[in-house]
Amino acid sequence: MTEFKKVFVDTSPIIYYLENSSLYSDSLMRFFAKCMEKDIQIVTSAITVEEYLVFPYSSGKIQLVDNFKRFVKYMNIEIIDIDSVIAEQGAKIRSQYNTFKTMDALQIATAVVSRCDMFFTNDKQLRQEKELPCITMDDLE
C-alpha cells in the first residue's frame, strides 16, 4: 500500500468497519490502527455523515448514531463541509468522468481541495480519477 499522511475515507469503509464486516474487519482494523500509530490525518465530508446516518435513523437504531459519533471523535476525523469551491471541483471531476455520481464527485473533490494524498473507498470505478491515488478495501494488506 502506498504511503500517505492525509487520507480521505469514503463512506463505505466506515460502514464496513462499524458494522464489523467479516469480509474486511481485520484489514480495516489494521488500516485504522496504522492511521493512529503513524499519525495519519483522516478526512471525510459531510456527505459521509449523511450517507452513514440514514440507516440508523430510518431503522431506529440510535446506538449506531452514537457509535459513529464516538468513532469520528476517537479517530479525530476531520469532517469537511461542502462549499462552493468543492462543488466547482466536483463539477470539473464530473465533466471528466461522466459516469461518476454527484456524491462520488463531491467526495473526491473534498479530498482534492483538502489536499489529501490518498482516497480510500470500496468503489473501484473511482480509481479512474487520476489527480489523487485511490485504494480500495481489497487493496489493504
Image: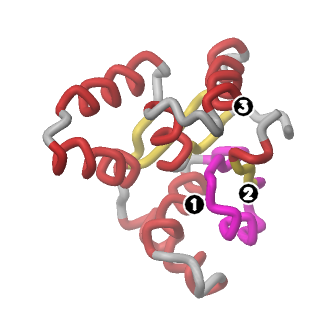
Image position of 120 (left or right of 54): right
Q: Are marks 3 and 2 in contact (CB under 8 Å)?
A: no
Q: Residues within 10 Å of mark 2 (few under 14, many from 20)?
A: some
Find numbered disc 3 in the image and state the secondary structure of the residue it sits on. loop
Residue 66 in percent (x, y) is at 25, 25
**Residue at image x 51%, y 71%?**
90
Alpha carbons under labels 3 and 1: distance apart:
17 Å
Among the 4 quarters of the image, the one containing residue 93? bottom right
Quarter of the image with the C terminus in it: top right
Q: Residue furthest front?
A: 22
Q: Earlier in the sequence, mark 3 or mark 1?
A: 3
Find numbered disc 2 in the image and state the secondary structure of the residue it sits on. loop
- The amino acid type found where label 2 is placed reads Leu
Q: Residue furthest left?
A: 60
Label annotation for residue 108? 1
Find numbered disc 1 in the image and state the secondary structure of the residue it sits on. helix
**Residue at image x 72%, y 16%?**
38
Image position of 85 (left or right of 46): right
Could one spot residue 81 in this view of the protein?
no
- The amino acid type found where label 3 is placed reads Lys
Label annotation for residue 132? 2
Q: What's the magenta region? A: 115-133
Among the 4 quarters of the image, the one containing residue 7? top right
Alpha carbons under labels 3 and 2: distance apart:
13 Å
Residue 29 in percent (x, y) is at 63, 23
The residue where tag 3 is placed is 5
- The amino acid type found where label 1 is placed reads Ile
**Residue at image x 74%, y 64%?**
127
Q: Earlier in the sequence, mark 1 or mark 2?
A: 1
Q: Are marks 1 and 2 in contact (CB under 8 Å)?
A: yes
Could one spot residue 1 in this view of the protein?
yes
